[in-house]
Image (spheres, helix red, strand yellow):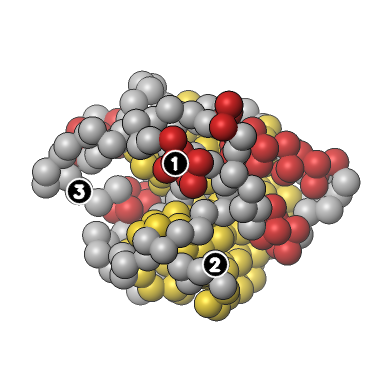
Amino acid sequence: MCLILFAWEVHPDYRLILAANRDEFHARPTAPAGWWRTPPGVLAGSDLAGGGTWFGVDRRGRWAAVTNFRDPVQVHPGARSRGLLVRDYLATGTAPSAWLAEVAGQAEAYRAFNLLAGDGNEVAWFGSRDGPVRILAPGIYGLSNALLDTPWPKVTGGKAALAALLGKNAVSAESLLALLADRTPAPAAELPATGVGRERERLLSSRFIRSADYGTRCSTVLLVGVDGRAEFYERRFAADGSCQGEVRESFQLLR
């Protein structure tokens, strides 16, 4: 994923509200979200080039998501695909923070990344450019291609938009997908400087990215209710930004 907005234990009906965009080169082969056989009981899309996935959830309510850390000069030949981190977490029964602590000891095997992992008890984050694992307190968070809650416009604006939905009690799959669909670029004065040039920074600054070679490939929403019901939505897009299909799943979490 390249934008993840989520609220953890701040809504009376939902323990977790998550909305995320996956931005990727359109030429990278991908399979839509579906139920995996291995590991069993996992609902996720599939990266057919590197293996693994960018986001997934299982029937127990365990979930994980990964973003890259934008650094155009990093070179790491032979690095493992970061999507394998999500897959590997979902194959375990280890608590999120304990598992991220294990990942921290082998982070050099991957290019720089951020990894979120959660279950019914905790949500934790590890950034390979930051240091120790953090167990997150209840709140609203945003993550893109820097550290957690780095105030890039798409992160601060996305968090504010999510907070507004919460304040109006207007949380739904459609309202969250609409939040993710915003194509407004950030003002020039607010663009970060990550080494990709001003034109590219402007392209990448909107929540939804559209260009011929790279852009938002899918939007994903996960709602986990206090009643143990999970709702999953994935909407996929072509290079021109048109919708190419949807996946919708609703299931009761296993106790």
Give the mark nearer the N terminus: 2 vs 1: 1
- Of labels 3 and 1, the one closer to you: 1
On the question of residue 115 being in view, the answer is no
Q: CA distance from mark 3 to mark 1?
A: 30 Å
Instruction: Estimate the x, y position of residue 198 in percent, counting from the top left.
Output: 44, 35
Q: CA distance from mark 2 to mark 1?
A: 19 Å
Residue 241 badge: 2
Q: Amino acid at mark 2?
A: Gly
Q: Amino acid at mark 3?
A: Arg
Q: Amino acid at mark 1?
A: Glu
Residue lying at the far top in this picture: please name it. Answer: 131
Who is closer to the viewer here, 57 or 27? 27
Give the mark nearer the N terminus: 2 vs 3: 3
Q: Tell me if residue 208 comes above or below residue 32 in the rendering.
A: above
Q: Are marks 2 and 1 in contact (CB under 8 Å)?
A: no
Residue lying at the far right in this picture: please name it. Answer: 168
On the question of residue 146 being in view, the answer is yes
Residue of label 3: 80
Instruction: Estimate the x, y position of residue 141 in percent, counting from the top left.
Output: 61, 35
Who is closer to the viewer here, 202 or 56? 202
Q: Tell me if residue 32 comes above or below residue 225 in the rendering.
A: below
Q: Quadrant of the C terminus?
A: bottom right
Residue of label 1: 199
